[in-house]
Image: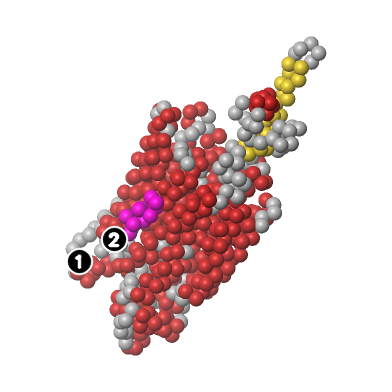
Amino acid sequence: MLYDDVLKLIGEFGRYQKILSIPVCIEPLSLALMVMVTVFSLATPPHRCKLPGFENDTYHQQSDYHGNLINQSIPQSSSCLLRNTTVDKYGNMTSVEYKCGSWVYDTSTYMSTLVTEFNMVCDDDILRNNAIMITFLGLVFSCSIISNFADRFGRYPVMVISNVLVVTSAYLLVWTPNYIFLVIVRFFVGIGLGGQLIAIFTIGVEIVGPSKRRFTGVLFHLGWCLGVLVIAMLGYCIRNWRYLQLAAAVLTSHHLFYFLMLPESPRWLLTRGQLDKARTLIKKAADINKTIITDDVLLKLRVSETPATAKFWKLCSTRKLTARTLAIYFVWFSVSVTYFGIMLNLEFLVGNIYLNLSLTAVIEVICYIFVMLMVDKSGRKKLICGCYSLQILSLIAVIFILLYVPPDLNWLMTVFTLIGQCGTICSFAIVWLWTSELFPTELRNVGTGTGSASARVGALVAPYLELLSKLVPGRFKEVSPFVFFGIICMVCLVLIVCVLPETNKQKLPDTVDDAGRLEHRSGETRDKDETVEMLGTNSKC
């Protein structure tokens, strides 16, 4: 008897699975805290060069005399230059502009940030982008390499080690003495976040039955929404980056106790031939769910085949599997570069940054609930196609607003950006669930991990999109990032329609051969029992 059949006997989403889903679904809280805290800790407030010889200089004008000094010494609209004006004995005035080495910052929004403490502005503004990028580089490394350990040695040990690494690094960041220390620790934060994210998500998906995967596959993301909302409130209340980082570290500390909350995945134990351990966990689940499972059923428990020697390159063993693997990777990249390209640059949108971030958190909750309700009814493929269409239309609207709408109506840009973000958020939720159903058990962790690594590549690109606008001349400077997003989304939509199969309510594939048998389905009438497990709604492209 296959593992999915046993799950139906003991309960696909009974009390046991619901209890385990609580720590699974709040795991992204720490991810959101450690990633989105950079919106505030690495924020760049308005600034200008410090006036030479004026020891008590501040960003805001202190007096008329101070205001005159600012007007004389600071070129108009410049934050990186000083002006030195001299008059010779004949009354000729000479003005020379030069770069400064110290700055004063506006403290009305942020009392202190990493940017103001280490002066990551002007010629050194790239350091800010690098500091954001390094965490995503750690996530790429972890998701693409470290996650492979979870398929070899188990989800549980990777989860435990990653949780310790995240919490330790979070506290170390509070005492950052210099920039080098900052980037090194943030890299290890990324490694830890990637390891815990993939391992815990995979456990959550593998403990529930086929018709209930959406509860862990989609509700998993509500923890992220909670984290975004929490960091928005903390950022509003705590304006010093060190205290804000400390608060984020304290709120990640619960992960140290996850070794008591989550067990190893029974499905993984079965694929590794550890039948006794798998049977023990399944019997425990049946007892908590108050169902009965006989010893005869447990003795017959198996997977499609024992895949102990499976290699990831098997997913590229046929043209069809290669196309699917590359397509789902591009979907990951697309949703990530669009999502983080907007989220990490909220300060450039019209409106209060704390309000904008809180709105995105509320919008995400609504989007995830919508996906949870619709993903089984419409199928993964139709729903994500609709989401991408929404993104594309919203991006086109933003481009036209920036090019042709008067400045006093720029708030429309924020509105359509958030509408497009709805499509991106829904796509993010779907692609997590869809990827876990496309890859077989023997490669699900590394498959989801490398897919997530593709998303982190998109996140690596996102911090630098601000710099893209500086390279584009003329009126297209502001719209260049949105044009980039639009092109990426259009290409992705074509790949989804033409390459990826529907997996709605189908059994999770245990082997590469099982994954290869997933096909585009036209929704023809089937027997009732087959429909429960195998229904698909999309036709072949």
For the point 44% across and 70% down, the residue is 203
For the point 25% across and 68% down, the residue is 532
Q: Which residue is mark 2?
A: 376
In the rendered image, residue 78 lying in the magenta stretch gets the answer: no
Q: Position of residue 364 (x, y in %)?
A: 39, 52
For the point 41% across and 84% down, the residue is 280
Closer to us: 385 or 370: 370
Label 2 Cα neighbours within 10 Å, binned few <14 / some 14-19 / many ≥20: some
Q: Which residue is mark 1?
A: 526
Q: Is 185 placed above or below 154 here? A: above
Closer to us: 47 or 391: 47
Q: Is label 1 or label 2 in front?
A: 2
Chief SS of the magenta region: helix
Magenta region: which residues? Answer: 362-372
- Name the N-terminal-most of marks 1 and 2: 2
Q: Position of residue 508 (x, y in %)?
A: 35, 68
Please identify the residue farthest to the front as the structure is shown.
63
Say which quarter of the image contains residue 267: bottom left
Q: CA distance from mark 1 to mark 2?
A: 17 Å
